Image (tube, rainbow, N blue to C red):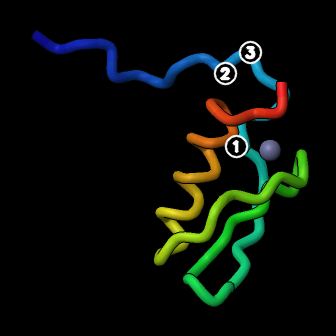
Amino acid sequence: MSGPVGRRSAPPNLCDHGGPATVERVERGYRVRCMVCGKAGPARKTPEAAHKALLVLGVRDGSR
Ligand SMILES: [Zn+2]
């Protein structure tokens, strides 16, 4: 059976990091900083992984 794989509604959070973000090159790889809320995610080996890490930590490890 096909589940709902459509777009999920925006989470009730301050920022869903769906806006513009900058990718910074660091020693360990890449780090993505959200230009909306200014939060930076952990360093990852690839920009994609870094962005994903920012999304996950932004929801789970928020300061709220
Ligand atoms: Zn953000």
Q: Residue 5 location, x and y as percent?
A: 33, 22
Q: Residue at x 72, y 43 (%)?
A: 17
Q: How packed is label 3: few (under 14 Cα within 10 Å), some, or many (20 or more)?
A: few
Q: Residue at x 62, y 31 (%)?
A: 60
Q: How packed is label 2: few (under 14 Cα within 10 Å), some, or many (20 or more)?
A: few
Task: Look at label 1 and name its amino acid.
Answer: Gly
Dot 3 or dot 1, earlier in sequence = 3
Q: How packed is label 1: few (under 14 Cα within 10 Å), some, or many (20 or more)?
A: few
Dot 1 or dot 2, earlier in sequence = 2
Circle 1: element type: loop
Left/right placement of residue 1 relative to residue 19 reads left
Task: Look at label 3 and name its amino acid.
Answer: Pro
Q: Residue at x 77, y 47 (%)?
A: 19
| Structural distance between the alpha carbons of marks 1 and 2 | 9 Å
Q: Which residue is mark 3?
A: 12
Q: Are marks 1 and 2 in contact (CB under 8 Å)?
A: yes
| Structural distance between the alpha carbons of marks 3 and 1 | 13 Å
**View quadrant of ligand 1:** top right
Q: Nearer the viewer, residue 2 or 61?
A: 61
Q: Residue 53 location, x and y as percent?
A: 55, 53
Circle 2: element type: loop
In this rendering, which labeled residue sits more in front, label 3 or label 1?
Answer: 3
Q: Are marks 3 and 2 in contact (CB under 8 Å)?
A: yes
Q: Residue at x 52, y 20 (%)?
A: 8
Q: Which residue is mark 2?
A: 10
Task: Look at label 2 and name its amino acid.
Answer: Ala
Above or below, 24 relative to 10: below
Above or below, 45 relative to 41: below
For the N terminus, the quadrant is top left
Q: Residue 3 location, x and y as percent?
A: 24, 13
Q: Which residue is mark 1?
A: 18
